[in-house]
Image: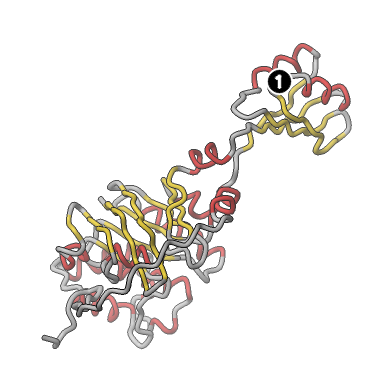
Amino acid sequence: MIQVNHLTKRYGSTLAVRDLSFSVAEGEIIGFLGPNGAGKTTTMNLITGCLEATDGTVTVGGLDSQERPETVRRLIGYLPEQPPLYPDMTVNEYLDFVYQLKKCTLEKHEHLDSVIARAGLTEVTGRLIRNLSKGFRQRVGLAQALIGDPKVLILDEPTVGLDPKQIIEIRDVIRTLGKDHTIILSSHILSEVQEVCDRVIVIHQGNMVADGTTAELSKRMTRATQLEMMIEGDTERVLCVLRSVPGVASAVLLERDGNKATYRITAEPERDIRHGVFESLAQNSLAILSMNQLQASLEDIFLKLTDADIPEAPAEEPRPETPKRKKFLFGKRGGRK
């Protein structure tokens, strides 16, 4: 559905996005992660056509965003970090305004009723936006992105500033929308990304540093297998048996509770020690009460991937500025020629 090829964006001598390439399949929910200033919002603005790329291409549904900008924009619903709301309008008035601004051709009343229901706004349609809670204002922003029934939704920090209850509500809405839309979701709440998204893309200093499922990234980042086990028996004897298993690099006692204790066992790189540990403990009549294989959390992965600095790319020679036609998210400004 979305294909990004060698996308680059420069602001003078600053390289905000560097030769970025990735694809998003139809129906996928992609988590777009990176520290502040990594280039996430710039990339999303490039995909929507709000910004023009210095180099590279973006295609949405097989259409080039530079060659067919108006058509591509109709395929995308965009919720920026600060929703573009008019606080002195009611919810109904605002959504009617956006419907006209987007030149939507779907039957208005039926379509807006559907958008209102999907965004969970039925109970507040007659209220002024300024009087809504932060959570409901986010829902109004999400509703405007849904107008026109776009195939793609790009959501930039949709739960920023919400309380835990509101975050759960918006998360549930996004999960439901994922059944009918391709979604790119930017968020600093990593647990949210892990719960909602099918795949994660991590960018750092404008470069893509990872692309895969959480399980794939965890496996890539954690070469050594780690087990956390609760075992019944004398701790000195248990440690002795664990450390004698071929492939075990270390075994440490974490917590003791009477005659049972929890241990962390680390394997040598690329070694699977589970079978050997199980057999050795069984042969020594040491009961295994629980065994879990530890994986790097998304937080661990994120910190490792974004910890190192990336060398600065050489600056380009200055090029003469050429006039460019301004582009707008919802089409041409009324009254301008």
Q: Find residue 323 and report its horizontal and vertical position in percent.
A: 20, 80
Q: Using a 10 Å C-alpha cutoff, classify the residue at mark 1 as few (fewer than 14 neighbours), some (14 to 19) or many (20 or more).
A: many
Position of residue 70 measured from the top left corner of the image (x, y, whole percent) = 16, 68
Q: Quadrant of residue 263?
A: top right
Residue 128 picture location, percent across and down: 38, 84
* Foreground residue among 183 and 66: 66
Q: Is residue 182 above or below residue 110?
A: above
Q: In which quadrant of the rendered view does residue 248 lie?
A: top right
Can residue 169 be seen here?
A: no
| Residue at (11% x, 86% y) in the render | 337
Q: How many marks?
A: 1
Dot 1 corresponds to which residue? 277
Which amino acid type corresponds to the residue marked 1 in the rendered image? Val
Answer with left or right where residue 1 lies relative to residue 170: left
User: In the rendered view, would you say 147 is above or below 277?
Assistant: below
Indicate left or right for 247 with 239 as reference: left
Look at 27% across and 53% down and name the residue there.
2
Residue 215 percent across, percent down from the top left = 50, 39
- Disc 1, SS: helix
Residue 329 is left or right of residue 132, and the answer is left
- For the view shown, which residue lies furthest in the front direction? 317
Residue 255 appears in view: yes
Residue drawn at point x = 28 percent, y = 62 percent:
55
Q: How is the image coloured?
A: secondary structure
Q: Classify residue 295 as left or right of residue 157.
A: right
Picture quadrant where residue 227 is located: top right
Quick one: 239 or 334, which is closer to the camera? Answer: 239
